[in-house]
Image (cartoon, rainbow, N blue to C red):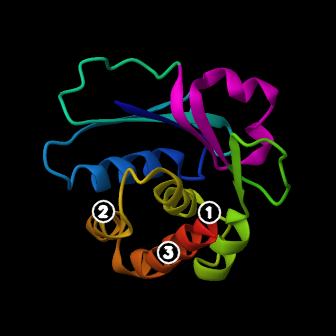
Amino acid sequence: MKEIIWHGRGGQGAFTASRLLGEAYSLKENSYVLAFPSFGPERRGAPIRAFTKLDDKPIGNRSEIAKADYSIYLDDTLFNENSFSELKSDGIILLNTKKKIDNERVITIDGDSIAEKYIGLPITNTILLGALAAISGLVSLDEINSAIIQTMPKRLYEKNIPAVKAAFEEVSK
C-alpha cells in the first residue's frame, strides 16, 4: 500500500487533491482507494491534513496514516524538522516553496508561481498533484486529467489541466 499525507490550510484544497489522487488511481484495474480529511473546527486558514491510501487489494485499515511514503505540503509554513518523523524510511516530502531545501528527501516546487500563471490564484492543490505524479509514478497525467474532468466544472478543469502538466514537467527536469 502507498500512503500519502497532504498538509495544507483550510481553503487550499488539500482534501480535494487527496480525492483527485484517489479518483485518478481508481481508473486502474484492481485498484482500491481511501481518501479522507482530518481537521478541527472548519475555518479558512486553519491547518488541515488529508490522507490518501492506494492499494491493489481492499484497504481494511481506515485510520490516519502514521508513516507515509509521501508527505505533501501545500503551504511551506507547515513544514518543519518534525515533518520527517511522519515518513517511512524511504519516504519523500514534496514541498511547495520558493526556498531551496538541502535535503535529498525533500523535493521543492514553486507551486504558487505555476498556479498564478495557469489558474490565476495561488491555489496549488492540483499543482502538487502533478508534481507527485512525476516523482512517484503512482498515476499518469492522463489519469489525473480524467479525474479532474470528472470532478471539476469546465471553467476550472480548463485551467487546472495545463497547470498539472506544467508542474509534472517542472519536477521531471
Query: At x 50% / y 57%, what residue is drawn?
Result: 129
Query: At x 46% / y 52%, what residue is drawn?
Result: 17
Task: Please give the label number shown on residue 147.
Answer: 2
Q: CA distance from mark 1 to mark 3?
A: 15 Å
Task: Please give the label number shown on residue 173.
Answer: none
Badge 3 element = helix
x then y, percent, for residue 127: 56, 64
Badge 1 element = loop
For the record, the magenta segment spans 67-94
The amino acid type found where label 3 is placed reads: Lys
Residue wearing tag 3: 165
Q: Is residue 49 visible?
A: yes
x then y, percent, for residue 51: 45, 34
What is the quadrant of residue 57 in the picture? top left
Front-most of residues 90 and 36: 90
The amino acid type found where label 2 is placed reads: Ala
Label count reads 3
Which one is closest to the eye, mark 1 or mark 3? 3
Quadrant into which the N terminus falls: top left
Q: CA distance from mark 1 to mark 2?
A: 18 Å
117 to the left or right of 23: right
Q: Residues within 10 Å of mark 3 (few under 14, many from 20)?
A: many
Q: Residue furthest left?
A: 30
First in sequence: mark 1 vs mark 3: 1
49 lies above or below 16: above
User: Answer yes or no: do the residues labelled 1 and 3 have beta carbons within 8 Å?
Assistant: no
Task: Please give the label number shown on residue 123.
Answer: 1
The amino acid type found where label 1 is placed reads: Ile
Badge 2 element = helix
First in sequence: mark 1 vs mark 2: 1
142 to the left or right of 136: left
